[in-house]
Amino acid sequence: MVLEFATAIFAAGWITLLVAASSLVLATILGLAAAFAKLSDSRALRILAGLYTFIVRGIPDLVMMLLVFYSLPAFLNQIMETMGWDMHVAFSPIGAGIATLGLIFGAYMTETFRTALQNIPKGQIEAAIAYGLTRRRLFFRIMLPQMFRLALPGFTNNWLVLAKATALVSLIGLQDVMFRAKGAAEATGKPFTFYLIAAGFYLMITLLSLAALSFAGRRSTAGDRKLSP
Amino acid sequence: MNWDIIADNLPRYLEGTKLTLLLTFASLGISFFLALPLAFLRNSNNRVVQYTVLAYTLVFRGTPLLIQLFLIYFGLAQFSLIRDSVIWPWLSSPMVCVLAAFVLNTAAYTTEIFAGGLRTIPVGEIEAARAYGMSGWTQARRILIPAMLTRSLPLYGNEMIMMLHATSLASTVTLLEVTGVARQISLNDYIQFEPYMTAAAIYLTLTFVLVSGFQLVQKRWAGYLQSRIG
């Protein structure tokens, strides 16, 4: 019986990974956009991006999720009611989960990318301009690759926190690893066993990610000049 | 909008805020004293000791806090040995379980932060302490621990904010801290916008105050590291 429930828990791993991967994509896009906004010449963009990271990083993940899942639809419905429209908005747990996690980790990615962008050696950008690269090419050929290399440790760290944060989506009803573990715990009266199995799943993701990081880290720093010992 | 309901419930939010702060600082306070020796053991020359501490920090940093909390609060009841023991009245209380989970979790992060700080202390400082004939204990007390703490300050500040935010999970095991209060009002009064917005505003304020306070502390205690770089 334990084996059957354990299989069900691991089968839900796909949901967890889907939520985590989708949120990561969203967070990366948001993070890139906000990082460039923070470093842009436009004051309005800088303030907007600053406000975004300040607010999102000041509110707990769980509260943010409740805000997106419960408060936002309630707010929209109230507006539509006053406007006299006959519509009703509700979000699915998976949609709200991905949107929330993307929003939250977008703010953390912003800081990671911004630091990385600032740490690109100026000479490389000057050299690219001297070679007559257009702005587009400068961005795609020089800045983006260099930024990703410098952002790799922070990026991986954000991913590790993000993967664990997906467990919160079970609280708004998404049938992920955590949700199935809870179900199995309540059905069998063996909560310790099944939460431990779920914990094992997350630990596996962490260990695999760390292994991937050390591989990618070795590759991305292959050309670094090191001080001779 | 139903902001009058929020106004009526302000005293409950105040109680919730007190509990949130209590959970945050109690967890941070206890884990601080656990992390100090663990950071030294993490850098110990004895491989067995070093890897034991690493295993602890890896497991607690590699799994969600929510699961750790559920393992302690719901999970321990599975074992009749624990259910029949004298500590059961303690372990069946949500407050004790929440604190235990938070302390174990944040101590793991803090250990790694402190151990990292310990590794970045310049060898010269340690050699100088030895040259003065300080004993191991005096070295730790006068040189290593202060240097380790000042170097860990920025990361430790982040960990404090993380802990403040993590206390919102206590609402999942019935504790009425800020998030718990918001959930209760939302369920009782059938409103879903105002309670959570209020909770978010409280957390935002607490975060802001904590971050500002921490910057002052950093200037005061870790300023000497700054001036050396700049």
Image (spheres, rainbow, N blue to C red):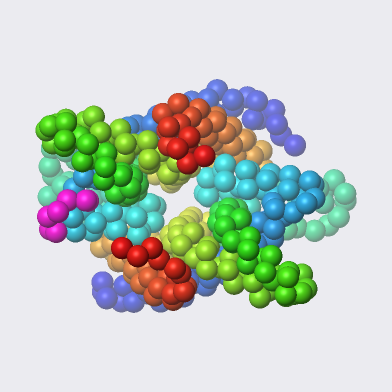
- Residue A130 vertical placement versus B183 (above, below): below
Toward the viewer: A24 or B12?
A24
In this picture, which residue range is highlighted in magenta? B42-48
Left-right relation of B121 to A82: left
Toward the viewer: B34 or B134?
B134
- At x 66%, y 75%, the residue is A141
- At x 77%, y 70%, the residue is A135
Residue A190 lies within the magenta run: no
- At x 52%, y 49%, the residue is A62
Residue B92: in sight, yes or no? no
Left-right relation of A217 to B68: right
Left-right relation of B15 to A74: left
- Residue B23 vertical placement versus A116 (above, below): above
- At x 48%, y 35%, the residue is B227
Looking at the picture, how far across and down is residue B162, in whole percent? 45, 44
Residue A36: in sight, yes or no? yes
Looking at the picture, how far across and down is residue B224, in whole percent? 43, 32
- Residue B102 vertical placement versus A177 (above, below): above
Left-right relation of A43 to B145: right
Looking at the picture, how far across and down is residue B93, in whole percent? 29, 37
